[in-house]
Amino acid sequence: MQSAFDQVTHNLLTQRQLGVNALQQALQQLYTGAIDFADIYLQSSVNESWVLEDGIVKDGSFHIESGLGVRAIHGEKTGFAYADDISPQALQHAAAAARGIAAAGSHGRLNAWQTPLATQRYEAVNPLQSLNEVAKIDLLRELDAYARSLDSRVVEVIASISGSYDEILVAATDGVLATDIRPLVRLNCTVLVEHNGKRERGSAGGGARVGYSYFITDLRWQEYAKEAVRQALVNLEARPAPAGTMPVVLGSGWPGVLLHEAVGHGLEGDFNRKGASAYAGKVGQMVASEHCTIVDDGTINDRRGSLTVDDEGTPAGYNVLIEKGRLVGYMQDKLNARLMGVAATGNGRRESYAQLPMPRMTNTYMLAGEHNPADIIKSVKKGIYAPHFAGGQVDITSGKFVFSASEAYLIEDGKITAPIKGATLIGNGPEAMCQVSMVGNDLALDAGVGVCGKDGQSVPVGVGQPTLKLDALTVGGTA
Amino acid sequence: MTPDMQQLRQEMHDVEQAVAEAVAFAKKLGSSAVECAISRSRGINVGTRLGEVETVEFNQDGALGITLYRGQQKGSSSTTDLTPAAIRAAVEKANDIARFTSPDPYAGLAPAELMAEHIADLELCHPADQSAEFALEQALACERHALGLDPRIVNSDGASYSSHVGYRVYGNSHGFLAGYLQSRHSLSCSLIAKSGDAMQRDYSYTVARKREQLWSPEQVAQQAVAATLARLDARKLATAHVPVIFRADVANSLFGHLVGAISGGNLYRKSSFLLDHLGKQVLPSWLTIRELPHLPGALASSPFDQEGVATIERDIITDGVLQTYLTTSYSARKLGLQPTGHAGGIHTWQVSDSGVNLAQMCREMGSGLLVTELMGQGVNLLTGDYSRGAAGFWIENGEIQFPVEEITIAGNLKQMLATIVAVGNDVDLRHGVRTGSVWVDSLRLAGV
C-alpha cells in the first residue's frame, strides 16, 4: 500500500508537473536576507452533500477545489498570494507576488527537508467513496421514516449527509515538508413538530474524521433522529425564560461552547502578542476558579477538530491552557510563536490555500471534576439548567461573550422543573470562569458538529466539558 | 495598477462563452434543463498595525456552479478550476448526481418569461489603483491619524484596505446569458482603548463600489476613535423593561430578520413567525419599505437575480402592510406564487423615516437604551423569539449618560416590528437595508 506521503506528493506534485525540487527552488528564491520564513501550501479537496426534505432526496451537490498559497514573512510582515490551480507557472507567480513585501537581499540557507514525526490521528480514507450513492440516499430515507415514526407531532424532517476529503502538502524554509489526508463526515437531522397550532424545531447530528459507516455502526443515525425529536418536543412545552443574573448549570458535552467563546479565542496567540486579548500578559495568573483545567487537544483519534499535523506541518498537540485556574499558555502558529519566543503548538490552521494560517482551536475542553451531576443540580435553589446551545460569540478585547441556549430548564429548590425558551447568556470570560464553583465527573465531548469562524475563515472544531455550575451569569429571558 | 475596463469586459465575454459551452455540454449529456454561473474577482487586501505593514494579500478567486435537471431530478456541482476540462468534469458530476436524486415536481428553472430582457448598466464597476503602495498608504494614513487623536487609544488591532474588481455571469437553457462587472473597495480601522485594567475595542469602516465614495482615511479614523473611546467605563444595568433605540448601523439587522421571515424558503417550510401574513399589517401604518434593485452604483444593486429573473423596483411594505413574499422559483412553486427575483437575497431596501434625527429620537424617548452592538444568534424565526447580547448607552433626560455592556435584550420580533415608534433619518448607506435608527417600544433588558 502506498503511504499517505507518497499519495499526496503524487497527486499534488508529480501529476501537476511539479516536484519537491520545484518547491525547494521557489522557497530558495523567496528566502532572501530580508525574509525570515516562507512556506508553500498545496491543497486539493472534494466534498459532497445530499439533502432530504419532504420525504425525498431533492438535491445532491459536489464541489472540487485545488490551489496553492505562498507566504513570505519578514518580522511581523506577511506577503501572501495564491492561485486556484497547481502548476509550475502558478507557483512562480504566487511566489513572486508574496516576496514583494521585503526588499531584495542575500539569499538565506534552507534547512534540509524534514518530515515531521506525527502520529496519524485518522485514517486516510475518502469518505465520498466509503458508501455508494444509493446507500447514502437510503440512509437519509431511513432517517426520515424513523424520525417521523418517533412521534405523530413530527410534520417535517430535513436530513443531510455530507463528506469531504482533503489532501494538503506544506513545504517551508525551516525544512518542514509535511502532508496530510483529512477525511470529514457529517450527518444532520432537523425536525419540525406541530401541536395545537404551535410549531417548534429540533436539530441534532454528528460527525468525525472517518468514512460514512460511522453513522451506521451503533445506529448513530437513530440517536440523532431521537435527539432532534426530543428537543423539538421539549421546546413545544417551553415557557418564557427568566431575565436577570442567576446561577446557571451547563450540561456536559456541547455546552463546552462556553469554553470556546469565554476562554479559547482569548488564548489564541495572535491576540495576545498584539495585547488585544483580555488574557494578554496573564500567563501564570489565576484567570479561572481552581476547579477549572482547560486543554486544547488536537490528538484525539478521529475527532472533528483533530489534526495529524496542522496547516504549517506542526504535529497537533495536547496543550494545557489553564491548569487549576492558572493560565499556562497560549495556542500558537509559527508566526506568533516566533514573535513571542515560544514553540508552535500545532494550532496553525487555515480554511484553505486561499487564506493565511492563524492560531486556531482544535478540540477544546475542560477536564472532569469530582462532583456527581445530580448533586450540582441539587445545590441550586433558583437558576437554570442548559444542556444544549445554538452557538456563541466573543469580543476578545473586553472579554464579553454570549452563547444561546437552545434547550433549557428552570431549577427550583434543587430540582429541574419546567422547560424554558431559548435565551442568550452573557458574561465576561475571566469573570465567568471565576464563577465556576462545581465541576462534574461526567466529561463528554460534543457529537462532532462544531464550526469556528475567525476573520472570515471557518474550520471544524470540537468542544467538551463536564456538567458545571457558574454561580452567577446573566440570562436574557423575557419573564 | 488600475484594472482596465476594456480588458475586464473581454475576460467576461470569454467567461460567457465558457458558460454557454457548459450549458450546451449539459444538454448534450441529456439534461432537460440547466443553469450555470461563473463569478471571478481579483484585487488586493492589505493590513497595517501600529504603523507597520502587517499583511499584503493578492486575491484572485473564481468559481463555477452548475445545476442541471434530468426531468425533475436535480444535480449540482461546483469547481474553482475553470479550465475547459475541469468545467466538463463538473457538468458530468452534476449529471451523475441527478441520476440518484428523487424526482421533485417543484424542481426546475425560473419561468422563461421572467428572465431579465434588457440588462441595464447599473454602474457597478469602478476599478481603482490595486497597487500595494497605494493600498498601504490608505491603511497607514488611517491608522496613523487614529493613533494620534487621543492618548486613551493605547493599541491598535490594525487598519486594512481592500480593492477588488470582478464579474458575474449567468446562463441557462432558456437561452438566457448575461453578466455584469462589479467592484468593491473598503477601508477599516480597529482600535483598542484602555481605562484602568479594562480594554475596549471598536472599529469603523467605509465600503463603496466607487473608491471616490469612500470616507477619507481621517474620517474612518475619527469614527473608530470616537466609537472606541465611547465604550470605556461601561456599566451593567439592572433588569427592567425599557424602550430601546437600535442605532442605524445595527438597526438593519431587525429588517434582516424580516427578510428571513418573509423568505419563501422559510414560508413553505412553515418556519416563519409571519406565516400567512401577505396583505396584513406587520409594521406601523406610517412605515414603507421600497426595494430599489437598479440604484446606480449601489452595493446591493443587481439587474437580475441568481436565476436570471429580472429584478423589479417595488414596495415590500406599503403603509405597514406586507406586499410580497421574497421567492426563488423553487419556493414560489411550493407556495403557488411567482418568483420575485430574490434568489440570492434582497437588493437595496429603502426604509422610510419619521423625519427625526437620532438626537431628537433620544430626546423624545426620554429614558431608555441606545443599542450600538448586538452579539450572538439568539433569534428564532419560527416563533419570533428574540434574545441577544447588547452594548450601547443609557439615555436619561433625552441625553446619553454612560456606556453599558454585558446586558441582553429580549422580546418577540413580531411585536417588536409592529410597535416601532420611529425611524430616524440618520440612514446608514453601507448596508443593503438602508435604514436610520429604529426606536422599539419596549424590550426586556436583563442585567444585574
Image (cartoon, coloured by chain):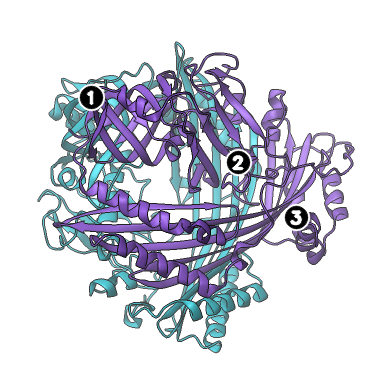
Chain colours: A purple, B cyan
Q: Residue A405, how many percent across, how many down?
A: 33, 39
**Tag 2's secondary structure?**
strand
Disc 1 marks a residue whose amino acid type is Asp
For the residues beneath circles 3 and 1, the answer to whether they share a chain is yes
Alpha carbon separation for disc pair 3 and 1:
68 Å
- The residue positioned 38% from the left and 36% from the top of the image is A403
**Tag 3's secondary structure?**
helix
Chain ID of residue with mark 1 = A
Residue sitting nearer the eye, A299 or B382: A299
Tell me the residue that label 2 is attached to: B46
User: Which quadrant of the structure image shows residue A1?
Assistant: bottom right
User: Which numbered marker is on residue A93?
Assistant: 3
Q: Are marks 1 and 2 in contact (CB under 8 Å)?
A: no
User: Which numbered marker is on residue A413?
Assistant: 1
Q: Residue B379, how many percent across, how many down?
A: 29, 45
- The residue positioned 20% from the left and 49% from the top of the image is B352
Chain ID of residue with mark 3 = A
Alpha carbon separation for disc pair 3 and 2:
18 Å
Question: Closer to the observer: label 1 or label 2?
Answer: 1
User: Which quadrant of the structure image shows residue B435?
Assistant: top left
Residue sitting nearer the eye, A192 or B317: A192
User: Which numbered marker is on residue A134?
Assistant: none
- Figure quadrant of the C terminus of chain A: top left
Q: Is residue B10 left or right of residue A16?
A: left
**Tag 1's secondary structure?**
loop
Q: Residue A220, how many percent across, how many down?
A: 47, 56
The answer to whether residue B215 is visible is: no
Q: In this picture, is A391 found above or below A321?
A: below
